[in-house]
Image (cartoon, rainbow, N blue to C red):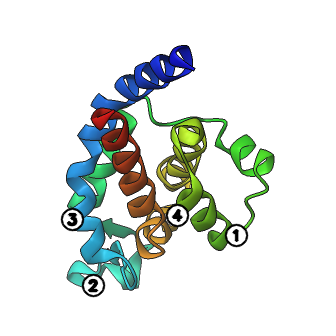
Amino acid sequence: MEKDETYMQEVANGYRPDVERLIKYIPWLETKAGTYTASSIYAGEGIGEHSITFPVYDSTLLSLVKDARQTDLLDRNYAYVYSRNRIRTVADEQVYIERATIRQMDGLKGILSKYILGGMTKGTVWTEGVANGSILKVLTKMKEILEYWERR
């Protein structure tokens, strides 16, 4: 039992620097959850008439993505987290996040990865992650787990 607790403490300490780097975005995510559009369409000087439109993203969102990419919290094999845990909808994600403990930190990383890495190829994924609150809930849960193990 003592050995398990020591191991869990080491796991928590390993995640701590990366999670602390991202929790500074929690207040911003709280204000944006619900009805957020992370991008607008650039339409300067009649560009819409002669060329394709492209999104312009919120600078705070781009900072979050940049910081997340510089951590070890992203897993390119996040699809396996979804299939292994039978996560198919946003509601399934929310339930998984709510029930997560230190043992599910890899699962939380997978959910975060879906939104950060998925947004690299399909920008609307970033908007979805902020609007449905999944990114916020993952970061909040990670912070909560680490605070629990810090008090032990």
| Distance from the alpha carbon under mark 3 to that under mark 4 | 20 Å
Could you tell me which residue is drawn at 22 percent across and 59 percent down?
60
Mark 2: amino acid: Gly
Looking at the picture, how far across and down is residue 131, in whole percent?
43, 75
- The residue that disc 3 covers is 27
* Structural crowding at the residue carrying mark 1, measured as other residues with C-alpha within 10 Å and reported as few (<14), some (14–19) or many (≥20): few
Q: Quadrant of residue 151?
A: top left
- The residue that disc 2 covers is 46
- The residue that disc 4 covers is 125
Mark 3: amino acid: Pro
Q: Secondary structure at mark 1?
A: loop
* Structural crowding at the residue carrying mark 2, measured as other residues with C-alpha within 10 Å and reported as few (<14), some (14–19) or many (≥20): few
- For the question of whether residue 12 can be seen, the reply is yes
- The residue that disc 1 covers is 89
| Distance from the alpha carbon under mark 2 to that under mark 1 | 40 Å
Residue 4's place in the image compared with 74, above or below, is above
N-terminal label among 3 and 2: 3
Could you tell me which residue is drawn at 57 percent across and 20 percent down?
1
